[in-house]
Image: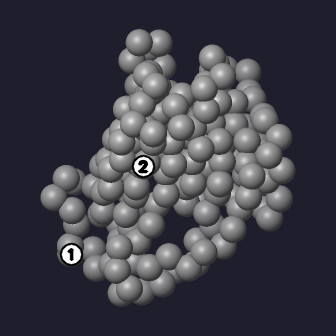
Amino acid sequence: MGLASLLFVASSAEASVEKKVIHMTVYSETGESAALRAIDGQPVIATNDTLKMSYRIVPEVIDKDTVRYTIYNGYDLNSAAPIEVIEARPDGKIHHGIRAAFKVSVTTVEEQALNTYPPEAPSADKARCCVTCGGWRYCCTPASGYCCTITTSCSSCRACN
């Protein structure tokens, strides 16, 4: 899936909010990996048009020792039903489901104070950033008042909402 780093961060010091940041790695069916950092509850989109696969991955910290990944079909954004739910502990072990064609591991979950900025100053690119690397396109759309950044070995981008 190519090496990627994804981090939802805030832009300026208007206010600070405590959020859980999940350090995780996603492994493709061919063994490629993407190292990601995401904020609890913020979705990550991973798409491979050649393989005709797209996933909306929503990580959620459900207790101090467990992250639940609710995985949706990325091509069917109207569907409320997940195609897979994977639970993982922050121990680096690789976990996989039955339907999704990837595996995931969590190395750490940490509480971080993230700065927010005024919602009246969104970025011109309508708060979506995407990077293609290794056949996979990684996209993020930040929540209001936050930014997201994707960095891979191929390129990087940043969007604020």
> In the rendered image of this protein, does residue 146 appear above or below residue 36?
below
Residue 95: image location, x then y, percent: 78, 34
- Quadrant for the C terminus in the image: bottom left
Picture quadrant of residue 48: top left
Picture quadrant of residue 122: bottom left
Residue 66: image location, x then y, percent: 79, 54
- Mark 2: which secondary structure? strand
- Mark 1: which secondary structure? loop
> In the rendered image of this protein, does residue 125 appear above or below residue 34?
below
> Image check: 129 left or right of 101?
left
Which residue is found at the position 71% from the left and 62% from the top?
A: 109
- Quadrant for the N terminus in the image: top right
Which residue is found at the position 65% from the left and 42% from the top?
A: 25
Residue type indicated by callout 1: Glu
Q: Earlier in the sequence, mark 1 or mark 2?
A: 1
Q: In this orientation, does residue 33 appear?
A: yes
Q: Which residue is mark 2?
A: 150
Residue 153: image location, x then y, percent: 45, 39
Which residue is found at the position 56% from the left and 79% from the top?
A: 113
Q: Which residue is mark 1?
A: 120
Out of 116 and 77, give the one closest to the viewer: 116
Q: In this orientation, does residue 80 appear?
A: no
Which residue is found at the position 45% from the left and 66% from the top?
A: 9
